[in-house]
Amino acid sequence: MGCAVSGLGAKADFGERSAEHGDAAAAADAVYPREEQVQMIKESWKVIRDDIAKVGIIMFVRLFETHPECKDVFFLFRDVKDLERLRSSRDLRAHGLRVMSFIEKSVARLEQQDRLEALARELGKSHYHYNAPPKYYSYVGAEFICAVQPILKDRWTAELEEAWKTMFRYLTSLMSQGYHEQRRRQRHLALSSKERPDKRNTAL
């Protein structure tokens, strides 16, 4: 695929853990980017943001090429066989832009850790309702990095790559925590509803 972090190695490279390990494993991966990494990310984003629509499309086409099982999460793209058709898909462009908007907000909040954590956790909670489990989150970060390397050209360095990886590890860890929090909440609500007496069988 022409990118060192794409393919099956991306899962291990981004510190993805089994969902069975829960929040403890996710927290272990949540290393906040250092100050110099934050500045590198912000500077590189100034270049990347001019091509966010293109990056979003490339990112998802690559994602479906390297991990075709990911299409199962996306109802609109589940039955698309010709990935080249996706490059001109308005739906894929719109979804890619939503993901890029999240990345843009994350970059903007890198110096506001509390707000960044809240943003990522909420996104993880919403992904529970989309039936998108944490095992997929790291793939997106890996394909983003592959998509932006040609845009940054000689500005891309090993240090910049590690800075972006650190940010994505942090974000995916928090998203995973949010996902598991929401799953526990939904299970608790389901159990609580089962324990309530059925009003139809109760004397008036």
Image: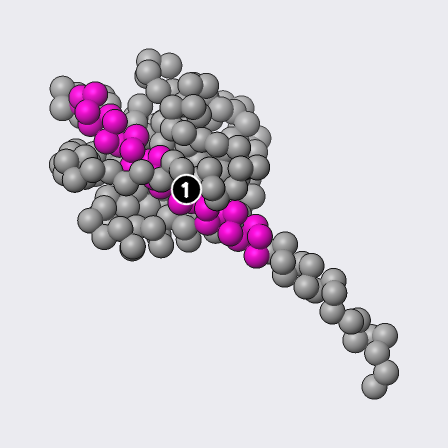
On-image quarter of the C terminus: bottom right
Give whichever of 162, 82 is nearer the camera: 162
Q: Is residue 192 above or below residue 28?
A: below
Image quarter in which the N terminus is found: top left
The colour mode here is one colour
- Number of numbered markers: 1
**Residue beneath the point at 36% across and 45% down:** 98
105 lies left or right of 25: left
* In magenta stretch: residue 128: no
> Which residue, given by chain and number where applicable, does mark 1 sit on?
27
- State the residue at coordinates (35%, 20%): 5
Which quadrant of the figure has residue 4?
Answer: top left
- Horizontal side, residue 86 vs residue 104: left or right: right
When asked about the image quadrant of residue 153, the answer is top left
Q: Is residue 180 left or right of residue 187?
A: left
Magenta span: chief secondary structure: helix
Q: Secondary structure at mark 1?
A: helix
Residue 17 position within the rendered picture, expressed as x and y whole percent measured from the top left: 48, 32
Q: Nearer the viewer, residue 125 or 89?
A: 125
Q: Position of residue 36 (x, y in %)?
A: 14, 36
- Span of residues in magenta: 156-185
Where is residue 46 drawn, in percent x and y? Answer: 15, 38
Residue 170 visible in this rendered orientation of the protein? yes
Mark 1, other Cα within 10 Å: few <14 / some 14–19 / many ≥20: some
